[in-house]
Image (cartoon, grey):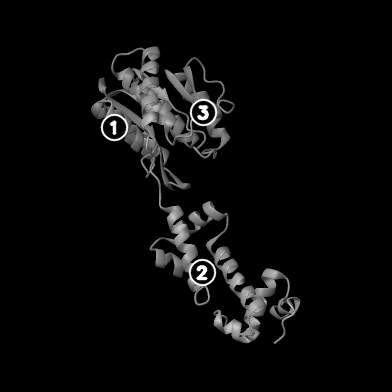
Amino acid sequence: MNRNIILTITGSDGTGGSGLQADIGTISSLGGYAVSVVTTITVQNTIGIQQFFDIPANIVRSQIDAIINDVQPAIIKIGMVRSVSVIDVIAGALQKYRPQHVVFDPVVLSSRKELLMPERVIEHACKVLAPISDVVVVRGGDRHIINDIGSAKCYVLDENAMHGFAGSFASAVAFFLSQHDDVDKALEKAETYIHDKVESHKEITGRGNLLYKEFLGLVSSHCAERSDVAYYADCLNVSGRYLAQICKKNDGKTPKAIIDSVLLRHLTDELSSTSKTVQEIAFGNGFSSQAHMTKFFKKKTGVTPTQYRDDFGHTE
């Protein structure tokens, strides 16, 4: 077997902060050579994970066979595994090929404390993969979830909010094991490595906050003419889905709800401070008729525009 090559079996992270991209980065930065098997493709950005596509078990098996048959990595690091069938495939491969060391990082919760897999899968991973691993790396916050890991050496990490922290630590352990260190020495060296990484870490940031402010400015300027979300997404040159993500993160509302609230504010300002008729206000704010505006206004406030105006002592 080739101790200079480390196989990581885990999910992908397009931001590079965790998953196989981060594993490859960690192993490479330490001087090792990483090969990989993908278990899950994630749709994610700096806001979080929006979708998973779990690779079928037979494809995972084929990936493992292709890599191990050819380059024979002696060290295997396992990360995100989201299905019982894939867990069984990996366990079967470990028993068949018998690598010298296995490091298991059960990716249970995201850095935002979201559960990443069903509890039955977590239980199966602990039952099947943990006992045939040399080291199981567990985040402190996950400790109540991870039980019954057999004879593996369980290493509990202190809480750390850094995205991909545990995965990088586990990859570092795998690398040092490839350098003929025993488990205790590999853990010690990985601790030093990850401490230095945390000290110098610069996490990637998205442009969501800036785009959100631009969106509010656009809505304030154009809500009288345009109330469709697609228009604002096109103006910002982003997908409607991403616009929805940044609005939810910043305000907890959908883009449409924000557009409607700004439009409503414009309507109430005009009703309370101008002498325009309701019909004039309706047409000036993009409604097809006074009745159209009345329906919208009453749905949002519980009163008609005329009733709202009367409450301010203003009559047409």
**Residue behind mark 3:** 159
* Front disc: 2 or 1: 2
* Front disc: 1 or 3: 3
**Residue behind mark 2:** 220
Indicate the secondary structure of the residue bearing disc 2.
helix
User: What residue appears at the point 63 percent right and 79 percent down from the top-left corner?
Assistant: 293
* Front disc: 3 or 2: 2
Q: Residues within 10 Å of mark 1 (few under 14, many from 20)?
A: some
Which x, y percent locates residue 100? 34, 17
**Quadrant where the C terminus lies?**
bottom right
Q: Amino acid at mark 3?
A: Glu
Q: Is residue 66 left or right of residue 12?
A: left
Cα separation, mark 1 vs mark 3, equals 29 Å
Query: Front-most of 142 and 307?
Result: 307
Q: Is residue 226 left or right of residue 7?
A: right
Query: Front-most of 252 and 33?
Result: 252
The quarter holding residue 198 reads top left
**Residue behind mark 1:** 35
**Quadrant where the N terminus lies?**
top left
Q: Residues within 10 Å of mark 2 (few under 14, many from 20)?
A: some
Q: Amino acid at mark 1?
A: Val
